């Protein structure tokens, strides 16, 4: 059999009509599968720890980047521009902390302005006081309150400069290190370094950055397609004679 990771797991099959043998083999199979998954988990955890340690070393970070946030922009000819924020904690995606952004203030294609709006909205939530209605000693912290140990933007020097500008705007420039990861040559742009950094191609650190960047890209594109599809349906309904706002809203629902 193959498990969800695609790895082969060998299971024993009992002879027909032997109930006791069936129970014993089921228990043996369960124990063998659990041991296999445990070994796989230990191996994965080791790779993730190695990746985080390598990133700390290569990027010159003061501490391990246990919480990494990555941001990406998706648009087609300036239409239905959206952004994504994905979060990895200790090398593992934390999907409950993922966030989508519908870009509102940018007309046309402007990746820098779109990235600026998205990052401002994210870090405004992290630094501004909570609304009066939810303040108090019993207020629980949310994922918005957590600052990343490393901020990654999908892009090169231009996108990185935007990220640094926004962090400085909110007084976080000294707290949140930021890098840009360019797709073409997998170059890592680091603040304060004139030349991009090239991590060794076979390092776990680069693999982790690529996984996070690709996940942010996937998340942004999926949301962009949904938003663009709704806009297309809405624009087609606008052209149908005799359909007013209420009927159009009912049809969309």
Image (spheres, rainbow, N blue to C red):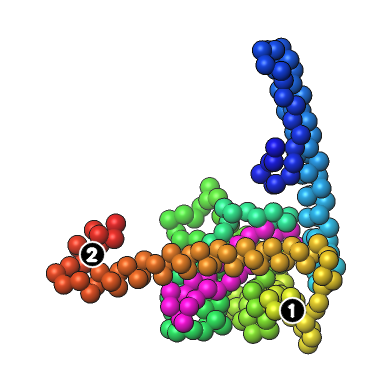
Residue at point 43%, 78% (across, down): 79
Name the quadrant of the C terminus.
bottom left
**Total residue callouts:** 2
Q: Which of the image's four quarters has the N terminus?
A: top right
Q: Position of residue 145 (x, y in %)?
A: 59, 60
Q: Is residue 117 above or below residue 134?
A: below
Looking at the rendering, the stretch of residues picked out in magenta corresponds to 65-88
Q: Is residue 186 left or right of residue 77?
A: right
Q: Earlier in the sequence, mark 1 or mark 2?
A: 1
The spot of residue 189 in percent (x, y) is 74, 79
Residue at 63% over, 81% down: 159
Q: Residues within 10 Å of mark 2 (few under 14, many from 20)?
A: some
Q: Mark 2 = which residue?
A: 248
For mark 1, does the 10 Å Cα neighbourhood hold few (<14), some (14 to 19), or many (20 or more) residues? few
Between 196 and 24, the one lying in front of the other is 24
Which is more toward the observer, 125 or 202?
202
Tell me the mark number nearer the camera, choosing from 1 and 2: 1
Left or right of residue 177: residue 120:
left
Mark linked to residue 185: 1
In this orientation, does residue 10 appear? yes
Answer whether residue 6 is magenta in the image: no
Nearer to me, 19 or 202: 19
Whether the magenta-drawn stretch holds residue 71 is answered as: yes
For this rendering, which residue is in front, 166 or 18?
Answer: 18
Q: From mark 1 to mark 2, how far is it between C-alphas?
A: 47 Å
- Percent x, y of residue 207: 76, 64
Above or below: residue 182 compared with residue 23 = below
The image quadrant of residue 119 is bottom right
Image spot of residue 78 (x, y percent):
46, 81
Q: Residue furthest left?
A: 242
């Amino acid at each position: 059999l193959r498990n969800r990771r695609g790895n082969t797991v060998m299971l024993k099959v009992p002879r027909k009509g032997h109930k006791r043998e069936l129970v014993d083999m089921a228990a043996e199979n369960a124990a063998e599968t659990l041991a296999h998954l445990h070994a796989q988990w230990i191996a994965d955890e080791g790779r993730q720890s190695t990746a985080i340690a390598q990133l700390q070393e290569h990027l010159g970070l003061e501490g391990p980047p246990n919480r990494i946030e990555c941001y990406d922009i998706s648009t087609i000819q300036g239409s239905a521009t959206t952004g994504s924020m994905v979060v990895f904690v200790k090398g593992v995606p934390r999907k409950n902390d993922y966030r989508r952004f519908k870009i509102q203030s940018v007309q046309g294609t402007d990746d820098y302005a779109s990235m600026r709006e998205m990052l401002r909205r994210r870090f405004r939530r992290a630094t501004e006081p909570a609304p009066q209605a939810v303040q108090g000693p019993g207020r629980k912290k949310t994922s918005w309150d957590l600052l990343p140990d490393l901020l990654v933007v999908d892009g090169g020097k231009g996108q990185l400069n935007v990220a640094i500008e926004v962090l400085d705007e909110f007084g976080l420039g000294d707290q949140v290190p930021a890098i840009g990861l360019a797709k073409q040559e997998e170059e890592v742009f680091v603040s304060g370094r004139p030349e991009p950094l090239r991590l060794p191609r076979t390092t776990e650190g680069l693999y982790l950055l690529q996984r996070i960047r690709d996940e942010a890209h996937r998340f942004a594109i999926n949301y962009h397609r949904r938003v663009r599809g709704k806009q297309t349906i809405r624009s087609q309904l606008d052209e149908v004679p005799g359909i007013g706002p209420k009927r159009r809203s009912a049809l969309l629902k």
